[in-house]
């Protein structure tokens, strides 16, 4: 609903402005959730940082041979073993696109991943690795107004040894659990 001014311009109602502000605040809260996820990932996938970012029944789908984990307990168990796969990393969560549903309770969260990491090669030697892909996540708003991931889907496009690059070796199976 809008009201007219003396200049015949439509002025948004307080209700409309409040809804727009809430949507912007929700988008910022979800961006913050992405940042916390990246920070936890860069602290050797610290489960104490990362698990609380997920709903109790969340789906964590890493794909590319690393598996899908459902619920806090299984996500925690995977994250506790992740330092055996990735020894060090730096995550760049690039160009987030956050689409809040009309009801304001769910959101689609897309972003690009560019990551540099150190992983053991087949000889057990530490090797620099380039990782690139996309995240296709779902988020839900809790009754207290906080946002959590209900689904995290990583689609890795490259996982390449730095010295060989993605042209020669677009995907290498560094540390995929057997």
Image: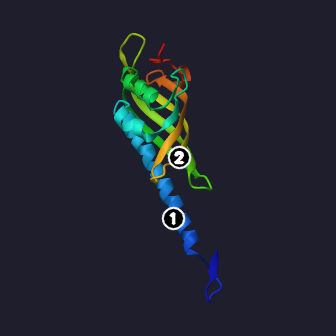
Q: CA distance from mark 2 to mark 1?
A: 18 Å
Placement of 63 over or under 121, stated as above or below: below
Name the residue beneath numbered marker 2.
140
The image position of residue 140, as x and y in percent, is 53, 46
Q: Is residue 86 visible?
A: no
The image position of residue 11, as x and y in percent, is 60, 78
Q: How many marks?
A: 2
Q: Is residue 160 visible?
A: yes
Placement of 123 over or under 143, stated as above or below: above
Pick the residue in front: 143 or 1: 143
Residue at the image point whose x is 53% and y is 68% from the top: 18
Question: Quadrant location of residue 9?
Answer: bottom right
Task: Looking at the image, tell me whether mark 2 or mark 1 is earlier in sequence order.
Answer: 1
The image position of residue 100, as x and y in percent, is 58, 53
Placement of 168 over or under 148, stated as above or below: above
Density class for disc 2 (Cα within 10 Å; few <14, some 14-19, many ≥20) is: many
Label 2 residue SS: strand
Q: Which quadrant is home to the N terminus?
A: bottom right
In the rendered structure, the answer to whether residue 39 lies left or right of residue 174 reads: left
The image position of residue 129, as x and y in percent, is 43, 25
Residue at the image point whose x is 46% and y is 18% from the top: 174
Density class for disc 1 (Cα within 10 Å; few <14, some 14-19, many ≥20) is: few
Residue at the image point whose x is 51% and y is 59% from the top: 24
Placement of 136 over or under 146, stated as above or below: above
Name the mark on residue 21. 1
Residue at the image point whose x is 41% and y is 35% from the top: 51
Pick the residue in front: 51 or 156: 51
Which of the two marks, 2 or 1, is nearer to us in this view? 2
Label 1 residue SS: helix
Pick the residue in front: 64 or 140: 140
């Amino acid at each position: 609903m809008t009201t007219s001014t003396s200049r015949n311009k439509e002025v948004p109602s307080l209700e409309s402005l409040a809804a727009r502000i809430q949507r912007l605040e929700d988008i910022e809260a979800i961006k913050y959730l992405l940042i916390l996820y990246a920070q936890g990932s860069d602290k050797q996938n610290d489960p104490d940082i990362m698990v609380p970012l997920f709903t109790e029944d969340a789906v964590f789908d890493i794909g590319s041979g690393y598996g899908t984990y459902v619920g806090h307990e299984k996500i925690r168990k995977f994250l506790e073993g992740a330092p055996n796969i990735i020894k060090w990393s730096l995550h760049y969560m690039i160009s987030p696109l956050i689409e809040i549903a009309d009801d304001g309770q769910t959101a689609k969260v897309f972003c690009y991943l560019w990551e540099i990491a150190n992983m053991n090669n087949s000889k057990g030697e530490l090797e620099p690795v380039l990782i690139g892909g996309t995240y296709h996540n779902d988020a839900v708003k809790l009754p207290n107004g906080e946002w959590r991931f209900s689904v995290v889907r990583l689609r890795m496009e490259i996982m390449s040894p730095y010295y060989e690059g993605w042209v020669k070796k677009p995907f290498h199976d560094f540390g995929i659990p057997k």
